[in-house]
């Protein structure tokens, strides 16, 4: 809802969060501390997965390995209920046919930016997501979130675009000559999920 980032007024801020705090202070308003009460919060016991980055492939896992990682997670943690947000008209790879056989894996189709997506994120017990709006929603609703992104993208955005928290991450190398290991990524994500479900 903010118009610009302050540069048009000769101002410079380290992140959009700092800029929003500046605007709120000028208006005499206090910064809302998560969980933000304007977000819908009907918690389920599902772990939301959104591993594809919108707008830049480096924000999340390459489409070629996304479904393999999801399948490995569902098999590795059969007692965990997973929810995958599949965004229509975003060029994401369609769910493979074997998905229907996974009893602990639910696919929800939605359009980017829809109220449905907001409700799904805000209702999740845990969020495992690429860098983007979903990560910020998890922060805003106070849900533990694991950021799955490339080392290259994380290095660019960590200082100015991410929420003001300590980030829990699974990072991978997105350079052209690197090989992404879906087995290791699924293992790292599973360990994070188990650790947070235990608390």
Image: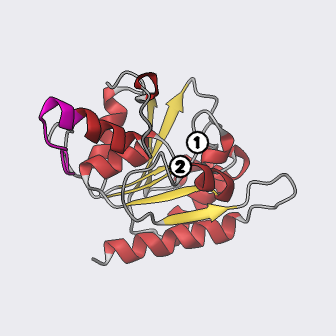
Does the stretch in magenta take in 58?
A: no
Image quarter in which the C terminus is found: bottom left
At horizontal 30% and vertical 37% (from top left) the residue drawn is 20
Q: Residues within 10 Å of mark 1 (few under 14, many from 20)?
A: many
Of residues 183 and 79, the one drawn nearer to the viewer in this rendering: 183
The residue tagged 2 is: 130
The correct choice, above or below, for 121 with respect to 79 in the image is above
Look at the image and give the residue range highlighted in magenta. Answer: 24-36
Name the foreground residue: 197 vs 11.
Answer: 11
Image vertical order of residue 131 relative to residue 190, above or below? above
Query: Circle 2 sits in a helix, a strand or a loop, which is it?
Result: loop
User: Could you tell me what secondary structure mostly forms the magenta stretch?
Assistant: loop
Task: From the image, tell me which residue sits under label 1.
Answer: 53
Residue at the (56%, 72%) spot, across then down: 188
State which quadrant residue 177 falls in.
bottom right
* CA distance separating discs 1 and 2: 5 Å
Instruction: Residue 102 in the image: state x and y as whole percent.
Output: 51, 55
């Amino acid at each position: 809802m903010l118009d610009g980032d302050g540069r048009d007024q000769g101002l410079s801020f380290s992140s959009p969060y700092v800029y929003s705090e500046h605007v709120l202070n000028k208006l005499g308003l206090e910064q809302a501390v998560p969980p933000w009460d304007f977000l819908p919060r009907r918690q389920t016991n599902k772990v939301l997965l959104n591993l594809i980055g919108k707008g830049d492939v480096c924000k999340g896992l390459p489409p070629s390995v996304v479904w393999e990682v999801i399948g490995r997670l569902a098999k590795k943690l059969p007692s965990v209920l997973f929810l995958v947000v599949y965004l229509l008209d975003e060029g994401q790879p369609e769910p493979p046919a074997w998905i229907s056989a996974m009893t602990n894996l639910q696919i929800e189709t939605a359009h980017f930016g829809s109220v449905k997506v907001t409700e799904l994120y805000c209702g999740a017990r845990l969020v495992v997501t690429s860098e983007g709006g979903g990560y910020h929603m998890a922060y805003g609703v106070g849900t533990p979130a694991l950021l799955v992104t490339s080392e290259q993208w994380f290095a660019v955005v960590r200082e100015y675009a991410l929420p003001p928290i300590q980030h829990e991450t699974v990072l991978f190398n997105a350079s052209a000559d690197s090989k992404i290991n879906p087995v290791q990524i699924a293992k790292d994500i599973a360990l994070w999920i188990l650790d947070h479900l235990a608390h």
